[in-house]
Image: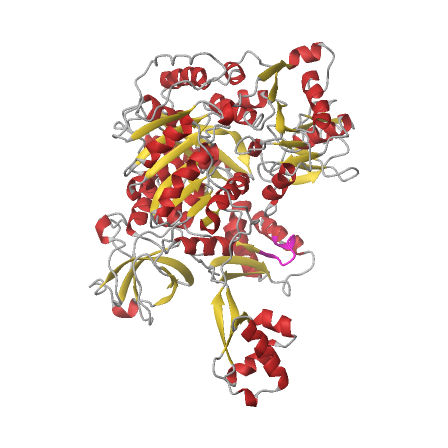
Amino acid sequence: MSNPPLGLLLAEPRALYFSGGGQEKWVEVLVDCPGVQGIYTYRNSLDVSINPGDVLSVSFGTQQLGAIAIRIVDSPPPNLPLEKIKDVEEVISPGFFPSSYCQLLERVAQYYCTPLIQVIRSALPPGLLGRSQRRIRLNSSALPKEAHVFINNSAASQILEILQAKPNGDYSWQYLQRQVKGAKAGLRHLLKRGWVESYLEAPKPTRPKLKKAVTLVADINRSNLTRRQREVLEVLRRRGGDLWLSELSQICNVSSSTINSWEDKGYVVIEAREVLRNATSPTMATDAPKNLTNAQSRALDLINNIDGFAQVLLHGVTGSGKTEVYLQAIAPILAQGKSALVLVPEIGLTPQITDRFRARFGDKVRVYHSGLNKGERYDTWRQMIPGEPQVVIGTRSAVFAPLPQLGLIVLDEEHDSSFKQDQPIPTYHARTVAQWRAELENCPLILGSATPSVESWVTLKVMGGATDGQIGSEINPLTSSAPEVQPFTCSPPQHPELSTHYLSLPERIQSRPLPPVEIVDMRQELQAGNRSIFSRSLQDRLRRLKEQEKQGILFIPRRGHSTFVSCRSCGHVVECPNCDVSLSYHYTHEGATQVLRCHYCNFGQLHPRSCPECSSPYLKFFGSGTQRVVQDLAKLFPELRIIRFDSDTTRTKNAHRTLLTQFANQEADLLVGTQMLTKGLDLAQVTLVGVVAADGLLYLSDYRASERAFQTLTQVAGRAGRGDDPGQVIIQTYSPEHPVIQAVKTHNYQSFISDELEQRAALNYPPYGDLILLRISGLDPVAVEKVAEDLADRLDTPEAEYDILGPAPASVIRVARRYRWQILLKFPPTVPARLVNWRELQDICPPDISLTIDVNPLNIS
């Protein structure tokens, strides 16, 4: 094993990497080890060939690590003694990386300032790259009673307390370092006394699932068989001569050991076969292509006639049939023997869209997202590699799905912020990576949305202009003519030459109208004596839901019961001990213990009987989350059946599908939830949509607040009136005059985008200028501030082409005991976001300080 020269980078020269093949003796690999850069040489002493792109297991120091075969060489480096070269232990998974795929990973690593191995780990299924882990456990036999009395080191005392709080007294060293300041000195103290042990846990790579099968031997001398043996083997013959061992044992009530003994006698052959772990889903009735509207037909014709790479913005109002366009665009792709990739922003959207795709394409549809267990993700990944024509539906990580014959990529709800990863690194945006991948695969990319992101609108509509695919600029069917887009105060940003098309679907299918939006001024409700969280108008519509046998959706910006708990005597707010935020009350059931919980670190504690500050018993819940709204609804409308749909109720596997299926089957009258129900739901019986507190979206300390608010409110309004019955939307707000509220009221995207782009251009915010956000965090507030200042000094050079904002504390300075500072770099329109010295910045940070580099962040608060 050798350490290459410091100047050697994986991407230089690109042509040398991931190339070669055969059964040569030496292989150069990229190891998965924190803090280690470069390529290492190993000997292939195995009986199998190793090829570039294979996932390997190698010995590295005292650890057993996962590694990627980069290239095969005829001889090791001349300055490396042969006796120091270790052997490759095992080939875990062969052939995972085709050449274009490797180029994509390298581009992500370069653009998002991330080590290549970290990008590879993000792209692979979890557990494939194994790594031994250092862990600390209690030595109970040596630990005296009242051990804390003998400790004069605070860090050691904290470590001991954490270990003793866990039943098996065992934690990873990485976790303990994050929880305890000065953990190294504390651990040395405990190790010296022999009260804890440090050990390495071997990696556990994911393996194929194997199951024993029994096959009947054709020519058997039946005269040698007993009556019982003939009966069992006759059952096996009638089942086609092939059965699972466990199934045969159960049917015939015979033990596995008995059947195993028959293999020795030559009656049967028993072998282990792989069983694929696929996500389960209900059997779907076959669905035929639908008749298209004129707008859908024109959009489909243009998409089908695209030859090679192009970006298409499919801008259709809610309910205009974008999914049917996707389905009919994918059908010829499959017929050509190619595959399609469909990305959705959230797991909660996959059941509905997956069911529609499976009804159309059957078992050619596969699902890939973080809600699957490791085995399911591993097997689904491997089924993509051979290149059989298929449709993969998944969330943002599915953008790395290894489809070798990719003919089309679709991003549904492309505007959604869930496509951007904030942490861990790489902080990639799936839309950007999808564009790069479509270029490499030379295939079209379709971006679909009723409320396109500002970036997509400027790139594909303003810059791309009206193409042969544009079918009209009118986006608002409620007005007689579309409003003019106002001229901008700044020229659009400069981009490389792109093949772009803008396609409009301005009307709902079957000419259904968009639902009228009623804006309720909650200030007037209060003046009229209504102190309920529901306006009189919304209450009236809720009462009529049951008698009309229709369904409704209520959108609440926050989950939980109440947003904070405050003392009415002194004003004290109960806060999280680990984060600088208030604790939220979470209701479970009547009579249950009241629990307060942090939405940042998940810390929980019992609701105090009195104020911790002044001992007053007058503590009150303030604000309304989904739990509080459901409670109030149950009191006001006991006849309504309610389903709560938020991250608290959808934690378990398949919970999204279960709840949505219950609602679709009309087992409930009202669906109450947060952001996850604002898009993708297509339910014909929903005639009412209510927004309880729109103001929670309008006044956030983020330059994207208006864009997010407009998108969220427009999307949730679009859930109403998708069936034969007209819909109604009621938005409650204390700011009815706000431009976003007025644009949502008239479904007027163009008036919103005109105002928004004018503000962005004036301040050089995306898409008129790029941003890079540096997030610094650690347990010591003084050390974090010092590192932030050092980084800012290093970035402030005469040749810098960006403005530096900060360093400054994050809006929530402490989360999970870690203090957070930020530095924001603003690049002018003519300068692309680039940090050539990002590795030097990482070196400035000591081991206990974390630095995350976020290119074009969606969240800078």
**What colouring does the structure picture have?**
secondary structure
**Residue 209 appearing in the image:** yes
Q: Main secondary structure of the magenta part?
A: loop
Please name whichever residue, 308 or 564, is drawn nearer the observer in this view of the structure: 308
Residue projecting furthest to the left:
78
Q: Is residue 790 visible?
A: no
Q: Residue at x 60, y 78 (%)?
A: 232
Q: Going by the image, does 516 lie left or right of 550?
A: left
Q: Is residue 390 above or below residue 745?
A: below
> Which quadrant is the N terminus positioned in?
bottom left
Residue at image location 71% in from the left, 23% down from the top: 544
Q: Residue 762 vs residue 82: left or right?
A: right
Residue nearer the viewer, 106 or 846:
106
Residue 788 place in picture, x, y as percent: 42, 33
- Residue 615 inside the magenta-drawn segment: no
Q: How many labels were placed on the picture?
A: 0
Q: Position of residue 65 (x, y in %)?
A: 41, 60
For this rendering, which residue is in front, 540 or 427?
A: 540
651 on left or right of 568: left
Which residue is outermost to the bottom? 224
Residue 579 place in picture, x, y as percent: 58, 35
At which x and y percent is residue 107? 31, 42
Would you identify the image quadrant in which residue 678 lies?
Answer: top right
Is 9 above or below relative to 522?
below
Quick check: is 164 in the magenta stretch?
A: yes
The structure residue drawn at horizontal position 60% and vertical position 62%, both measured from the top left corner, is: 139
Q: Which residues are magenta?
A: 163-170
Along the line of sight, which residue is nearer the eye, 717 or 615? 717
Give the image quarter of residue 852.
top left
